[in-house]
Amino acid sequence: MIVVLGATGNLGSKITAILQDSNSSFIGVSATSEIPGFRRGELMDRSFLAEILSGATSLFSILPGSLYPVWKDYAARITSVLEESPVTHVVNISNAVTEKGGKPSILNSFENELNLLGKVNIKHLRCANFFDNLNWGLDNGYDGDLKLPYISTHEVASVAADYLVSRNFSGHSVDELLGPG
């Protein structure tokens, strides 16, 4: 069974559509949606995380922006639950920009926390900015001469879904999904 966090979001909804089309067994998790067959719950709730991961083999992980202020607490919670769960493979969405202002980005720091899990195979997908978020790229706080690559969320979803289903990776590794050069 695959668990998809953020299943109704921009990327998660595309992953769940691919999984539905391939008849893969999955649970979609959302903080706000009431879609039949999906689970609504709070990612900071340890008992909720333990429940949804109790029968899972694969996890799609995305750190929602709403958890950025408490990302360290969330990282401790999710890694603790993963250590006790049957999950063997995690596909984690990150960002190709690993530093901002000379400091590791939140998503890069979150990667490092996940990498503390020894028994879980983790594939970090370091993505370019999403075309869907183009307006964000116009006012993001980066230096004006920084070139930011963009990629389609459909492309990222396809790669993520393939890894979730095939579980054909081991250890902790990174794929950079940067879009056209």
Image (cartoon, grey):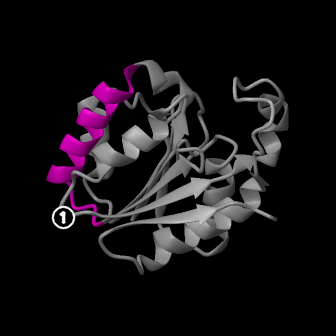
Q: Nearer the viewer, residue 112 or 89?
A: 112
Q: Is residue 25 left or right of residue 150?
A: left
Residue 52's x, y, as percent?
Answer: 33, 46
Give the residue drawn at x 29%, y 71%. Answer: 171
* The quarter of the displayed image where residue 16 is located: bottom right
Q: Nearer the viewer, residue 140 or 67?
A: 140
Secondary structure mostly seen in the magenta stretch: helix
Q: Nearer the viewer, residue 180 or 44?
A: 180
Quadrant placement of the N terminus? bottom left
* The quarter of the displayed image where residue 42 is located: top left
Count how many numbered circles sit on residues in the image. Answer: 1
Question: Is residue 57 among what the camera can see?
Answer: yes
Q: Is residue 53 left or right of residue 156?
A: left
Q: Label 1, secondary structure: give it.
A: loop
Residue 170's x, y, as percent?
Answer: 33, 75
- Residue 74 counted in the magenta span: yes
Question: Is residue 40 among what the camera can see?
Answer: no
Q: Amino acid at mark 1?
A: Lys
Q: Nearer the viewer, residue 46 or 119?
A: 119
Give the residue drawn at x 81%, y 43%. Answer: 132
Q: Is residue 12 left or right of residue 58?
A: right
Q: Is residue 125 left or right of residue 53?
A: right
- Near mark 1 (Cα within 10 A), the count class, few <14, some 14-19 or many ≥20, is some
Residue 57's x, y, as percent?
Answer: 32, 66
Say which residue label 1 marks. 119
- Residue 155 counted in the magenta span: no
Quadrant placement of the C terminus? bottom right
Residue 105's x, y, as percent?
Answer: 49, 35
Q: Residue furthest left?
A: 84
Q: Which residues are magenta?
A: 70-88
